[in-house]
Amino acid sequence: MDEFFHSIEAARTIYVLGIINLVAGTLIFFTCRCLPGSKIAGRLTNHSLYKRLFRYHCHIWKVFIPSVGVHALFAIMLYGWPG
């Protein structure tokens, strides 16, 4: 098993999960109901795209949390504990 974490597949998995984390984190941020406090974001909530994306807000969390966990686990196993 240790061989896998020192392979190119593990590094690719870390990279792909990092992209998924960025996309899911951005979607969570922009579909959050707390965001409309700012003037710019307040106008976003009136658009149909926001309303369609908001329906998936809770489901995006279900992708984001495991993705961050696996990303962190793979990174620690490949690169070691920081510090």
Image (cartoon, helix red, strand yellow):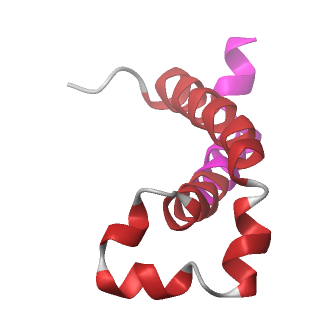
Q: Nearer the viewer, residue 20 or 41?
A: 41
Picture layout, residue 37 above or below residue 5: below
Q: In the displayed image of the protein, which residue is found farthest to the front?
A: 46
Q: Residue at x 62, y 33 (%)?
A: 65
Q: Quadrant of residue 34?
A: bottom left
Q: Is residue 9 magenta?
A: yes
Q: Is residue 20 magenta?
A: no
Residue 66 percent location from the top left of the image: 68, 30
Picture layout, residue 80 above or below residue 52: above
Q: Quadrant of the N terminus?
A: top right
Residue 76 percent location from the top left of the image: 47, 24
Q: Residue at x 32, y 69 (%)?
A: 37
Q: Quadrant of the C terminus?
A: top left
In magenta, the rendered stretch is: 1-19
Residue 22 percent location from the top left of the image: 55, 60
Q: Main secondary structure of the magenta part?
A: helix
Q: Residue at x 43, y 80 (%)?
A: 42
Q: Nearer the viewer, residue 67 or 34?
A: 34
